[in-house]
Image (cartoon, rainbow, N blue to C red):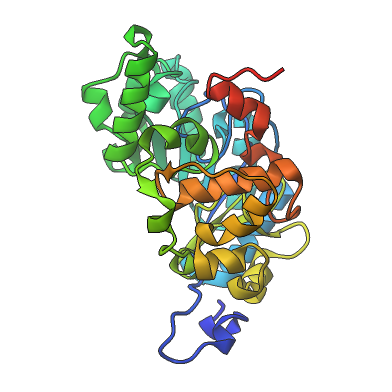
Amino acid sequence: MSKLQDNLYNQHTRRHESKMKLWRYAGLMLTYRCPASCAFCYYNCGPEADGLMPVDTALSAWQSLRKLAGDTASVHLTGGEPFVIYDHLAELMTQAHQQGLGRVDTVETNGYWATDRQQIVERLGYLDSVGLGRLKISWDPFHAEFIDLACIQILVETARQVLGPARVLVRWEKYLQDPVKFDRLNTAQKQTTYCNAAMDDSCRFTGRAASTIGPLCADKSIAILRSRNCSQSFLGAKGVHIDPYGNVFSGLCSGIIIGNINDKPLHQIWEWFDPTATPVVDTLFTSGPAGLLQEAVAGGFEPAQRYASKCHLCTAVREFFFDTGAHRGIIGPGDCYMGQANRLQEAGIVKE
């Protein structure tokens, strides 16, 4: 198990200064593909998305996390939607179980696949036998636009019978009691529903959420956001997400690549990660997303008057950098970014 002083940044800090936390969890994003295209998606997942994390890559990341955090290491399997590749998911968990890597803390799903009770019993029973800790079912007004409520109801009921109530989480269960019926809403009503849900449950305005919901909830001027840096977002991150291609994102900061496990093991990425010496990250660390504006504006970026959060501003600037090819290797991969044509389409603007 690593120690705080093993990290390069921590070696240069004084006793009273904040240190880089040890990464103790890793969210392994097995794919970007998902049957839903939720407006709140922190990435840009959907039916047309791609990517598949090889089993060996996932196992390597898991093993490296254990070198970092020892027995406190926590892995959750997510996507996209991991059940679109159920056989792959099952094979990964089987091999991890055989190698004694410990239980999977959480497997996340939107429940789209839960149409047959017997299949639910068989799948969850098998995953339980190879180390499933908890099943997390994503359910909210955003998912309700794409996923049949009946699937969620049968999955929740059956999963609690198979795994026990304490091992089945629903995000957010309150919407099961009062579900949103999107087929009855017009565009304006949908937008109001999006914004209300985002405010109620602290939506992070990155990925698709920045383009679809961010403008609806924008209430902060750039002057206000200039005072908000990201130092604690990087130092305080208790873990990472790793995408299907091996790209490592600090915490929930999707689309900012701080390393790749195909180039260097995860524990070594943590050891060498110094946010003050990493391009783009260093600016975010000291000045926040507003610090990126000068470069972006000089290149032609036109900022909006208001943003929903510093993450919304950050994503808008990074979308511009992605479109213009700036900071390649750090701003990426394309799966996390909508691209200019898609953003215009979401905004209702058709560009010839």
Q: Quadrant of residue 218?
A: top left
Pick whichever, 148 or 146, lies toward us: 146
Q: What percent of the width, then of the height, locates residue 158?
A: 35, 25
- If the image is split into quadrants, where does the C terminus sit? top right
Q: Is residue 106 visible from the viewing direction of this image?
A: yes
Taking the spot 32% from the left edge, 17% from the top edge, the residue there is 189
Pick whichever, 7 or 82, lies toward us: 7
Taking the spot 22% from the left edge, 21% from the top edge, the residue there is 178
Q: Quadrant of residue 1?
A: bottom right
For this view, does 340 lie left or right of residue 109? Answer: right
Residue 120 vertical position relative to residue 336 in the rendered view, above or below: above
Residue 305 vertical position relative to residue 232 in the rendered view, above or below: above
* Residue lying furthest top: 184
Taking the spot 68% from the left edge, 48% from the top edge, the residue there is 321
Q: Is residue 158 visible from the viewing direction of this image?
A: no
Taking the spot 59% from the left edge, 79% from the top edge, the residue there is 7
Pick whichever, 236 or 348, lies toward us: 348
